[in-house]
Each structure stands twice: as C-alpha cells, then as structure tokens.
C-alpha cells in the first residue's frame, strides 16, 4: 500500500476515510492519563479578512535566542492565498504579538515561490531560511532566505535556489509534499542557531533521477551571494524508499532520515555517510518498516528522527503497531514511537510505545510532526488524531501532546477540549524551551477555524 500525502490536509482527509478494524495484540506499554499542563493559545489564524494573516499551519514553530517564534502557513496571506511566514513576539508578561513577515506570490508568475512548508530555521544574524512547495523560476519550488532590516520592520526575500533548474529536473522538484521537510545544518540537534556559512541539507519528496525524491546540500559560496547546490542521493523506491522527511546531522557529519513509503516495507529509516573528503556519500537502510507480522514494528513514518547524546535515534510512524482499537481499515495500527541504535544493516529497532491503547484512543493516534527531548531523555511529541474529544472536524479526536518517559506515556493535553475546538486541532509536533514550556501549531481549529499557535505550560 502506498500512502503519498500531498499535504497535511491530504493526510487528514485520508485518515478520515478509514473505517474500523479490531486487532488482538496489546500495546507495548501503558499510558497514565493526563498531566497538569495548561494550554494557552498564542494566536488563532484567519483573524483578518480573507485569512490574510495565514491559514492551516502544517509544521511546528521555531524559536530564536530572543524567544521570538517563527513559522509558516501554506495557505492564506495577501492577494493570491499562497502562504505566509510569520513571527510571534512575547512582551515577557504573557502577551504575544503576531507579525506577518512575508506573503508569497506578489511577483508575476509567483517567482518568489508558493505554499511554504516545513517551517523555517534561524541563523545567528536573525535571517530565516525555508522552502516552498511550488513557484519559483521553474514552478517547482524554491529555497529562500528572509532577511530583516536593522529595525526589523521590513523583511527582504532572496531566492537561494530554484528547483528543477537542471535538465529533466534531475535535482528533484515539488518540495515538501505531505510530511514537510525542514532544512537542517550541523549543530541543529543541539539547539544552536544556524551559523550562516556551513552547508544546509534538505529533501525533495518527488523528482530526482528515480522520480521519488532526493537528498541535497546547499552551500554558500564565500565572498559572494551565490549558493552551490549538490544532490547527495537520488532515491530508489525499492532500495531507499520514497518521500523522505526531515533530516538530522550528527557530530561526524552523517545524515539520518526517514521515508514515508517504499523500501521492502512501509517506509525506511536511513543513514547517509560521507567519505573523508565529502565527495561521495554512502546510503544505508537502517530499518525497513512493516517487516513484522501486522506491521507491529510500525509503518509509514511521517516525520524525521531525533538523536540523544549516545547516538541513539528516536522517531514515530504514522501507522503500524498492534493497536486493539485503531480506527484504520487500510492497514493495522495507529502508530508507534521507536528507537533505533545505528549499526548499519544490523541496526536494531526497539518499540517504545504503540498508540490507541483503549477505545476512542484517549492516548492519541497517528503520531506526526517533530519530537523533542529534555535533558533527562524524556520524549515530547504529538498525535494527529485521537484524545477522546471527538468534536473535531473528522470526528476522530483533535489529537494530543504527549510525554514518553521510557516506555510510559503521559498525555499532556487533548485538543478539542473547548467548544468548536477553539483550542486548536491536529497538532504538528512540538518544540521545548529551557523552562519546559512546549510550543506548536494546530492545523485547524482555533478561534477562527484556520489553525492556531499554542503554548503548553507545565
């Protein structure tokens, strides 16, 4: 079964179409109910006429050193409704101010790009970097930079790369369809800001020589305003998988990521390692999902992985696992959290948690989006569905934010706890600040139905 999602909206639609089956295998570990976290909605989109402030954020936010939050919406904005980049600024007293930094497609032919997805990263000078799904010179997506003036009152967009610039689109095209890819860089896993001079890494979900995506490097050329683009790997459906998600890079320069589909099962976890001169890269599939009976090991990972200090990888799959109560007729399971110790083709996957532990999935189901980790090794993430508050758009629960301590899951918040899902629905991952607050976005819901940015306060 191939599950290729064009966007989180497509992901939502396909899940909504699934009916119920019952499996007989219990979950890996228990969940302990909700912990005492308080939700605060920082902003509800579509507060302005025509959703000129943006709509339906499909990726989580990022925070800079001054505690400003930045993110993207693939829809809404001024004029042609082609997406936005936004900022939320705190006054230090609990109040947050929304600012529209850029609205895409003001230029003829949308040469600046359309439908930004995957969010943004921030460098030490305060510039933002991201990708668009379409638009640009060739209509197949862009990598862009947004730079503020000295007073941060105006932002200028600069296109670093136009996809499909090479003959036959061998570079990959149509970025970030479905599980959107955030750019990454050396040091990103530690929370450090991008230095502005080292390479950026990312993925395309289609294109490349095999047509199923590519992994690329984009490096600034010293002394110029130019960037050098290089394909590190064109994916092969049956070897690598297809539709790669976000990447992480370790201290040795190895890249790790997942693919939503393909491989010998339902997606893969992979490593891409450079030689000493970084002129060649070697790909290794660390795990092919759905190789166990009933996809008990998980299937269709819809987000990238994170790594702890020992080099162990952690991630989620949107499907799979032996759930008893999963509302999914197209394949078993409501998703899992896994860990993976990289050891080439001998890498061992360990299942930490299987979602949908009880009827109506009060622990959540279909985990998606970025996870994060605290200093004690506890994992924090979100599920796209479930939670038990079935007043959401699709009647399957508005999703949850969870903490996983070892193999014990604590539900920190269940969305659609408020009338009309005014607290948001369908979260897309979380980030964590030094005080333990969590931040994220909801695809839909909020006060105006166009999605929201939230804070969870312990």
Image (cartoon, rainbow, N blue to C red):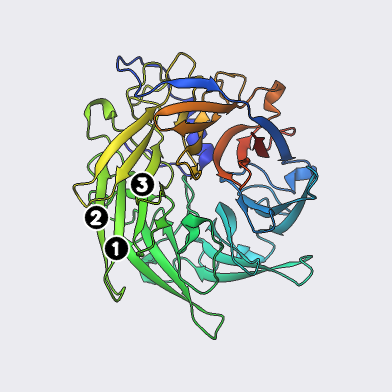
* N-terminal-most mark, 2 or 3: 2
Q: Which residue is mark 3?
A: 313
Q: Which label number is shown at residue 129? A: none
Image coordinates for residue 367, horizontal then vertical, percent: 46, 34
**Labels 2 and 1: the sequence-earlier one:** 1
Disc 2 to disc 1, how far (Cα)?
Answer: 8 Å
For label 2, the residue is 284
- N-terminal-most mark, 3 or 1: 1
Q: Which mark, by number, is residue 273?
A: 1
Q: Is residue 203 left or right of residue 455?
A: left
Which element carries disc 1, helix, strand or loop? strand
In which image quadrant can residue 348 be found? top left
Nearer to us: label 3 or label 1: 3
Label 3 to label 1: alpha-carbon separation? 15 Å
**Cα–Cα gap, marks 2 and 3:** 15 Å
Task: Give residue 237's position: percent from left, percent from top.
Answer: 27, 50
Q: Is residue 452 in view from this perspective? A: no
Picture coordinates of residue 81 (x, y %)?
67, 50
Could you say whether the residue bearing mark 3 is in a helix, strand or loop?
strand
Residue positioned most to the left? 346
Query: Could you classify mark 3 by the number of other residues whose Cα lies within 10 Å: few (under 14), some (14-19), or many (20 or more)?
Result: many
Residue 137 vertical placement versus 29 (above, below)? below
Residue in the picture at 54% in, 70% down: 195
């Amino acid at each position: 079964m191939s599950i290729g999602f064009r966007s989180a909206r497509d992901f939502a639609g396909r899940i909504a179409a699934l009916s119920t089956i019952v499996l007989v295998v219990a979950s890996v570990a228990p969940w302990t109910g909700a912990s005492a976290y308080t939700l605060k909605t920082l902003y509800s989109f579509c507060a302005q006429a025509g959703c000129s402030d943006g709509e339906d954020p499909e990726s989580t936010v990022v925070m800079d050193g001054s505690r400003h939050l930045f993110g993207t919406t693939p829809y809404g904005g001024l004029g042609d409704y082609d997406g936005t980049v936004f900022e939320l600024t705190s006054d230090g007293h609990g109040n947050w101010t929304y600012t529209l930094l850029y609205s895409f497609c003001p230029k003829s032919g949308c040469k600046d790009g359309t439908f930004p997805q995957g969010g943004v990263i921030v460098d030490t000078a305060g510039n933002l970097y991201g990708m668009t799904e379409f638009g640009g010179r060739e209509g197949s997506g862009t990598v862009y930079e947004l730079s503020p003036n000295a007073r941060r009152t105006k932002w200028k967009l600069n296109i670093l790369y136009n996809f499909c610039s090479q003959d036959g689109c061998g570079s990959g095209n149509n970025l970030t369809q479905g599980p959107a890819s955030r750019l990454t860089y050396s040091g990103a896993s530690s929370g450090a800001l991008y230095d502005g001079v080292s390479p950026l890494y990312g993925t395309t979900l289609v294109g490349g020589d095999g047509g199923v995506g590519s992994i690329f490097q984009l490096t600034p050329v010293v002394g110029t305003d130019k960037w050098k683009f290089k394909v590190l790997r064109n994916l092969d459906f049956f070897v690598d998988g297809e539709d790669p998600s976000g990447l992480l890079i370790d201290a040795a320069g190895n890249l790790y990521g997942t693919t939503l589909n393909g491989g010998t099962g339902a997606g893969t976890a992979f490593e891409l390692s450079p030689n000493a001169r970084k002129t060649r890269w070697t790909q290794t599939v660390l795990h092919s999902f759905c190789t166990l009976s009933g996809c008990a090991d998980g299937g269709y990972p819809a987000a990238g992985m994170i790594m702890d200090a020992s080099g162990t990888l952690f991630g989620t799959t949107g499907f799979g696992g032996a759930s008893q109560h999963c509302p999914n007729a197209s394949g078993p399971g409501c998703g899992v959290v896994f860990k993976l110790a990289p050891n080439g083709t001998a890498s061992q996957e360990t299942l930490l948690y299987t979602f949908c532990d009880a009827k109506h999935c009060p622990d959540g189901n279909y985990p998606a989006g970025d996870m994060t980790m605290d200093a004690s090794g506890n994992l924090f993430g979100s599920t796209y569905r479930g939670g038990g508050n079935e007043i959401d758009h699709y009647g399957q629960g508005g999703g949850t934010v969870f903490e996983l301590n070892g193999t014990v899951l604590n539900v920190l918040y269940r969305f659609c706890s408020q009338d009309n899902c005014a607290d948001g629905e369908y979260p897309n991952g979380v980030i964590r600040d030094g005080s333990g607050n969590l931040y994220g976005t909801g695809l839909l819901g909020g006060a105006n139905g166009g999605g929201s940015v939230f804070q969870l306060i312990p």
